[in-house]
């Protein structure tokens, strides 16, 4: 079946899905954006609201639809899943999310989808693995948003400490998008200069920065009840890289295949992304402490996914 390169389907018209649709509309990446939700009335309302805004932006079609629209879509974004509340961790909602993700993926694949699946349902690493296995797609065609947003937060916090623009900072958060994530300070570069060399005799509160990045979502949820803008922008960034065949390196969730001795589990590593999905998974130079942290993160995620093997009803 031919793929409609200008169509993107978003499954889940909640805060994240609707915000992602709005951001995609503003960027003009696709001429057709389709929203699908179990609550058809909400999908229609959100699509209509965004379509009204689109009249003041670039030409395009934003509408609600059905899983049949996924058949020839270039990309399907899966945001449907269980929401967290208060201090509830992402991993705590894994069972509920797994049921939703499996059902959505079954409907997507039954429609005849052959494009690239972008997963943003929490806990995103486990749901990326659940989605990839349920879809039967190659791992390079299923991309979780992973730690892309965490890495942006990391760069922003570092930039504030270093008194430089965030765009001047290269930095990665790796592993789980969650409490076991690894702030890879060894990957930090400012204009190609390693962090320690850039700092000289200065010191920065590394543990505090890492904790602040990890807990950022909890702070936002406490304040407004959910997150939306940051993760929606991360979704758009991945879709942009695919749509424009950018071949850019982004830290996203993918199935590890031996890097750092980690296999058979989805977690975030820097990935080269283009029109066909993940073109290559990179293994950055990390310290021994960071490698051990990454392996611990992988072990946590393996246990979570193993516990979900029976979460089907």
Image: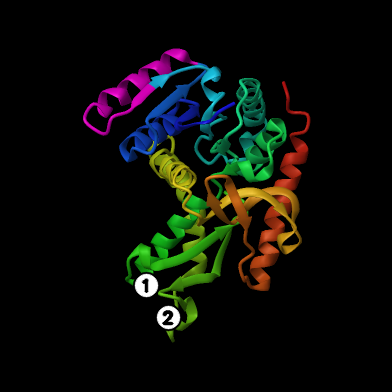
Q: Which residue is nearer to you in this view: 15 or 179?
A: 15
- Residue sitting at x 51%, y 17%: 66
Residue placed under numbered mark 1 in the picture: 162
Residue bounds of the magenta highlight: 39-62
Residue neighbourhood size for the residue with mark 2, other residues' Cα within 10 Å, grouped as few (<14), some (14–19), many (≥20)? some
Depicted 183 relative to depicted 139: above or below: below
The quarter of the picture where residue 139 lies is: top right
Q: Is 174 left or right of 206, judged from the image as shown?
A: right
Q: Quadrant of the C terminus?
A: top right
The answer to which quarter of the image holds residue 221 is top left
- Residue 41 among magenta residues: yes
- Residue 158 spot, x, y in % from top left: 41, 66
What count of labels does the image hold? 2
Percent x, y of residue 45:
36, 17
Residue lying at the far top of the rendered structure = 41
Marks 1 and 2: CB-CB under 8 Å? yes
Query: Is residue 309 a member of the stretch shown in magenta?
Result: no
Q: Residue at x 55, y 28 (%)?
A: 2
Circle 2 is placed at which residue position?
198
Res. 239 in view: yes
163 sits left or right of 16 in the view: left
Residue 149 vertical position relative to residue 55 in the rendered view, above or below: below
């Amino acid at each position: 079946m031919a793929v409609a390169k200008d169509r993107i389907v978003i499954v889940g018209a909640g805060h994240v899905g609707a915000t992602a649709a709005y951001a995609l509309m503003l960027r003009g990446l696709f001429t057709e954006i389709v929203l699908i939700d179990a609550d058809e009335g909400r999908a229609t309302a959100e699509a209509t609201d965004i379509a009204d805004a689109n009249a003041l932006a670039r030409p395009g079609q934003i509408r609600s639809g059905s899983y049949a629209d996924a058949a020839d879509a270039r990309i399907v974004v899966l945001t449907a899943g269980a929401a967290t509340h208060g201090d509830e961790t992402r991993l705590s909602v894994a069972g509920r999310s797994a049921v939703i993700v499996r059902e959505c993926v079954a409907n997507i694949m039954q429609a005849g989808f052959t494009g690239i699946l972008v997963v943003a349902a929490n806990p995103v690493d486990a749901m990326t693995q659940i989605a990839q296995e349920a879809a039967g797609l190659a791992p390079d065609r299923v991309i979780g948003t992973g730690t892309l947003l965490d890495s942006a937060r990391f760069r922003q916090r570092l930039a504030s400490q270093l008194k430089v623009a965030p765009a001047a900072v290269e930095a990665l958060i790796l592993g789980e998008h969650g409490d076991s994530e690894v702030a890879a300070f060894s990957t930090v570069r400012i204009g190609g200069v390693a962090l320690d060399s850039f700092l000289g005799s200065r010191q920065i509160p590394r543990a505090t920065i890492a904790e602040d990045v990890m807990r950022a979502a909890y702070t936002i949820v406490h304040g407004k009840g959910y997150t939306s803008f940051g993760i929606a922008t991360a979704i758009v960034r991945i879709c942009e890289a695919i749509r424009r065949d950018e071949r850019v390196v982004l830290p996203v969730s993918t199935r590890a295949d031996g890097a750092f001795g980690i296999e058979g589990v989805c977690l975030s590593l820097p990935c080269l992304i283009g029109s066909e999905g993940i073109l290559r998974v990179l293994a950055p130079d990390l310290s021994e402490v960071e490698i051990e942290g990454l392996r611990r993160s992988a072990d946590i995620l393996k246990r979570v996914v193993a516990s979900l093997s029976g979460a089907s009803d």
